[in-house]
Amino acid sequence: MSDVAAKVKAIIVDKLGVDESEVTTEASFTNDLGADSLDTVELIMEFEKEFDLAIPDDEAEKISTVGEAVAHIEAAL
Amino acid sequence: MELKRVVITGVGTVNPLGNSVEEYWKNLKDGVSGAGPITHFDASLHATKFACEIKDFDPLQYMEKKEIRKYDLYTQYAFASSEQAVVDSGIDLEKVDGDRVGVIWGAGIGGLQTFHEEVRAYKEERPRFSPFFIPKMIANIAGGLVSMKYGFRGPNYTTVSACASASHAMIDAMNTIRMGKADMILTGGSEAGVNECGVAGFNSMRALSTRNDDPKTASRPFDKDRDGFVMGEGSAAFIFEEYEHAVARGAKIYAEIAGGGMSADAYHMTAPDPEGRGAHLVMKWALEDAGLKPEDVDYINVHGTSTPLGDIAEPKAILKTFGEHAYKLSISSTKSMTGHLLGAAGAVEGLASVLAMREGIVPPTINHSTPDPEIDEKLDFTFNKAKEREINVAISNTFGFGGHNATVVFKKL
């Protein structure tokens, strides 16, 4: 697992209160990990803070799984 | 329309004297102070370095880990006392008609710590607010979230009248059931103001005691050397229930909510009317609402915050309302032990009144040593030691900044 993936996973475990084993690459924030719309916005903000980058709203809307988040962050770094 | 009768069938609390009703009562009757050095934050630079904090609160007893992060502490306290009250009432959540159960809550401030943390983070860490900033901070969210937990779809709102908030909530809860709009209302209040903003804000008003060398004796209502209130925190919850509904399901009944009064001082932003006119009106109207005479009252749990002005005005109002009977009343300020729970004060003190009635014991006003010549010494403030007394009617006074006054009348069934 890449460094980015490990950090993303840790943020998700902390913010959504889920078990680490549930945070798979394919897992959807809302369908699999119990996030609501507010949780999703908060996750994006935490990613921005952790990786010191800005994710515009139109791009944030396309991020719905763990893998999509990791890919977007890795591409932006 | 004939008004229905309203009774209390469940109670719960977390407050500086205990995390259960029985622990609370034991410490109340034993005259224990809940004050100590502030542990919630570093108060070394604050004028006041102590408060009545809740001890050993474990939110995981009442909510999921992921909820804790989303719920301000004032909401966590609401969840704790509400769960205790629901369990105590013996309501079968599977069978109860959730459409007929409401939640009317009281909070004076709401998520003050959340507000502080978010504004700080906005300035120092990121130019955006968390999506939970607003829903976590607003003063009505505790009551909303509690309704979601239990599926209570009846009337739901929160009253905000500073230190009278919970009493207003309880009066509205009573009236809602009286009018037949609900069978049960979960009511009470919660507050979590022991934080930097709360302590510094009240310090600036010179409202808090600064007796840092002896916190346990700082809350000394009606004592000549009182120097301000001591901040408390926590919650108390009640299940108010329509009398016939309670009887039909064989519920345990603590007391009847016989009436309530509401008035305003219309005098000053924070100072009480020195003659206690609003305080007199609210007690008078509460008794009228309950269909009782002043002579029927045995015990008053007073607002008595240990501030220089408030503790003079309230006894004047009692004398005006009760006349000669004032000297036969038992009076006490349990804030001498719990500190001042602000918007939750009416709930924890209402609970103290109900328990005093159940046990036939008047809890004391502790920390009294020097009489104040401006307060009629013939009034019985139950100084320092609890007193046995049969209580058939008790009233609980709460007065808030803004001049809001509320009095709740409890009656033995």
Image (cartoon, coloured by chain):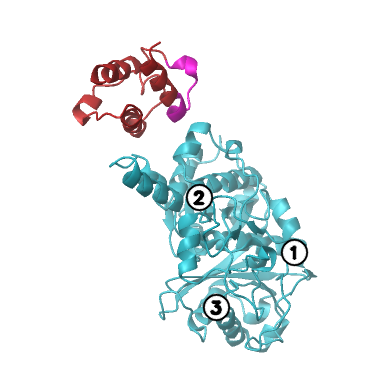
Chain colours: A red, B cyan
Label of residue B74 in the image: 2
Residue at (64% x, 86% y) in the render:
B375
Furthest residue in direction front, as rendered: B45
**Residue B93 in the image: above or below residue B123:** above
B311 relative position to B69: left or right: right
Q: Residue under circle 1?
A: B31
Label of residue A7 in the image: none
Q: Position of residue B149 (x, y in %)?
A: 49, 38
Q: Position of residue B178 (x, y in %)?
A: 51, 61
Q: What range of the chain is rendered magenta? A: A13-23
Secondary structure of residue under mark 2: helix
Furthest residue in direction top, as rendered: A1
Which label's residue is closer to the chain start, 1 or 3? 1
Are the residues tagged 3 and 2 within 8 Å (C-beta)? no
Residue at (72% x, 52% y) in the render:
B23
Q: Residue under circle 3?
A: B310
- Foreground residue among B322 and B141: B141
Q: Position of residue B173 (x, y in %)?
A: 50, 58
Are the residues tagged 1 and 2 within 8 Å (C-beta)? no
Separation (CA) of disc 3 from disc 2: 26 Å
**Residue B230 in the image: above or below residue B291:** above
Separation (CA) of disc 1 from disc 3: 22 Å
Which label's residue is closer to the chain start, 1 or 2? 1
- Foreground residue among B91 and A17: A17
Where, by quadrant of the figure, is residue B312 drawn? bottom right
Locate the C terminus of chain B and report the quarter of the image it occupies. Answer: bottom right
**What chain does mark 3 sit on?**
B
Secondary structure of residue under mark 3: helix
- Foreground residue among B20 and B199: B199
Let me know if residue A16 is in the magenta part.
yes
Furthest residue in direction right, as rendered: B388
Dot 2: few (<14), some (14–19), or many (≥20) neighbours within 10 Å? many
